[in-house]
Image: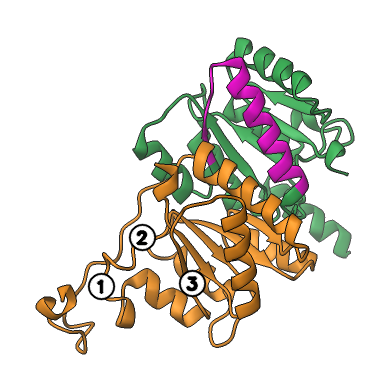
Amino acid sequence: MPEHAVILLAEDEEDYVLLIKHAFEKARIPNPLYVVWNGQEAIAYLMGAGVYANRAEYPLPDLFLLDLKMPRVNGFEVLEWLRDQPGLAAIRVLVLTSSEDLRDVNRAYQLGANSFLVKPLDFQNVIQLSHLIQDFWLKVSSAPETYRPPRTSSKEPGRKPKADEVG
Amino acid sequence: MPDHAIILLAEDDEDYVVLIKKVFEQAHIPNPVHVVWNGEEAIAYLKGQGKYSNRDEFPLPDIFLLDLKMPRINGFEVLKWVRQQPTLAAMRILVLTSSDQIRDVNEAYQLGANSFLVKPFDFEDFTHLSRLIADFWFKASRTPETQRPPNALENPTNRLKNQGEKNR
């Protein structure tokens, strides 16, 4: 079961996304990894809105790796939004940031981050951290149930009819 | 620094406390472990109240291992209380319980548990888990600042009275 756990990564830096993908490969982490490039996309993904309307194609994550400094909507705002959504509030969020500022650490935990990790820059250290995340979060720690807010056609007037979604 | 990180363990089963201490020894985890035996004691410890008023002797923990099923005040209630205290809200709390009920998992995370761990009963599995906790939470993950709630020893009426006297 841990190999099927879905990981969502919110990260605006393409090089770092590649680095993480390589590290996961090297660490033999076979889990599906979905990437969103800013906070606005992260929220759309979690809601299953817009381009993420096909919820089978974009499943809710078992683990959410969240950068803090991102354009449009930043990581703090994503955290704050997430913890207010009844079906999503239990999602496990690991902040993964280049910030070492203690004020950011405090604020992230206060807003409900499950953990706060400073991005390792050395490739070996990224691999090591990936192993640790896999062993702790995907294997030993129990995962909660989560669900997306129910679709209401009145709130999503622009969404496609169901038949189109499947195809 | 990770060696000095303080662990608070809330657990009402004495045998399990002894087991955890042995496991930590076996896993070469030298960190100080403070034990409280129920939820009421856990809250008193975090407030620095009663027999925990010597704050040098009973420092705030860097990691709080919290059992759910405890007498008087249970783990869920402790979680809820901690998250309502502005100066303690960032504290890292790992639920460590024998329950593997999904309702308990959901509720614990919703109340703000940082992680949910089912107690291993095999000694080897437990040693493995302890090493993972030390490697992830003491070494890789950053620790927030926490402070004891202000004026925890006083009730609100006394606090107002004292402030009035100070202002004079």
Q: Nearer the viewer, mark 2 or mark 3?
A: 3
Which residues lie in the magenta part? B116-139
Determine whether the residue tagged by mark 1 lies in a helix, strand or loop. Answer: loop
Q: Is residue B134 magenta?
A: yes
Q: Position of residue A130 (x, y in %)?
A: 63, 53
Gap between marks 2 and 3 measured at Cα: 23 Å
Q: Mark 1 or 2 closer to N-term?
A: 1
Residue bearing the label numbered 2? A86
Residue bearing the label numbered 3? A35
Residue A14 higher or lower than B116, as above or below: below
Determine whether the residue tagged by mark 3 lies in a helix, strand or loop. Answer: strand
Gap between marks 1 and 3 measured at Cα: 15 Å
Q: How many residues crowd mark 1 within 10 Å: few (<14), some (14–19), many (20+)? A: some
Q: Give the residue at x 18% y 77%.
A: A165
Chain A display color: orange
Residue bearing the label numbered 1? A54
Left or right for A128, reference A47: right
Chain B display color: green
Q: Position of residue A38 (x, y in %)?
A: 53, 81
Residue positioned most to the top: B15
Note whether residue B3 is visible: yes
Q: Are marks 1 and 3 on the same chain?
A: yes
Q: Is residue B131 magenta?
A: yes
Of residues B159 and B153, the one nearer the viewer is B153
Q: How many residues crowd mark 3 within 10 Å: few (<14), some (14–19), many (20+)? A: some
